[in-house]
Amino acid sequence: MASARVEGSEVESAVEKSLAACECAVLAISGGLDSMALLTGAAKLPVRARKTISVATFDHGTGRAAGRAAALVARHAYRAGFLCVSGRASTVGRREEEWRRARWQFLRQVAARRGANVVTAHTLDDQIETVFMRILRDAGPRGLAGLYAESEIVRPFLNLSRATLAAYAKQHRVAFVEDPSNFDRRHLRNRVRLDILP
């Protein structure tokens, strides 16, 4: 029980510290476990701090799970008192890079309109995976910086493991949608996560 309290405190402290540094923040919430933990942590902030926070979610149009995730995000954002801006892909891409490009175009547009920083739920695990992928692609010194190289994006969980967020989500009964594409080995990140890294 003690470790669960530490994990909860760790997650919420990371959210509070990162968002305190932002004049205005747009939370990028996909509906997956990590991002719903971010939304849950932000919802626990004092009312005054929450006034400068909004939520953005993007439906890639890839199937029922994507639609359910977008609906879940909108519902929970509303309950927390956050404005939620939803976007949807105009065409359904087949490659992970296409999804990422469309998602980030949407997120940056939302953030620019509000004069806000984009805040994501990337974890230490994501950082390790990104560096490993860039090594495989021979990305050079900047590539080895991984997610730290993208300094305009706020990432509260970059020093926290995915397991820590999972424990937090379990403790707080955080609802989330598991994206089936996370297990599709046609995508390099999934192969790295499922087959290469421990």
Image: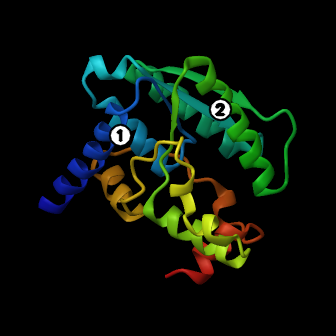
Quarter of the image where one finds residue 22: top left
Quarter of the image where one finds residue 149: bottom right
For numbered disc 2, what is the local secondary structure?
helix
Q: Check disc 1 and report the residue beneath it.
A: 18
The CA span between labels 2 and 1 is: 18 Å
For numbered disc 1, what is the local secondary structure?
helix
Q: Look at 74% across and 31% down and name the residue there.
A: 88
- Is the residue 152 above or below the residue 86 in the image? below
Q: Kindly identify the amino acid type of the residue bearing the numbered disc 1.
A: Ser
Q: Position of residue 12 (x, y in %)?
A: 27, 43
Q: Check disc 2 and report the residue beneath it.
A: 108
- Is the residue 84 above or below the residue 166 in the image? above
Is residue 15 at all visible to an observer of this figure? yes
Residue 106 is labelled as none
Count of numbered circles in the view: 2
Q: Position of residue 2 (x, y in %)?
A: 12, 60
Q: Tell me, what colour scheme is on the image?
A: rainbow
Q: Is residue 26 left or right of residue 64?
A: left
Q: Look at 37% across and 16% down and name the residue there.
A: 51
Q: Is residue 127 left or right of residue 113?
A: left
Farthest residue toward the front? 141
Q: Nearer the viewer, residue 139 or 196?
A: 139
Q: Position of residue 131 (x, y in %)?
A: 58, 70
Quarter of the image where one finds residue 137: bottom right
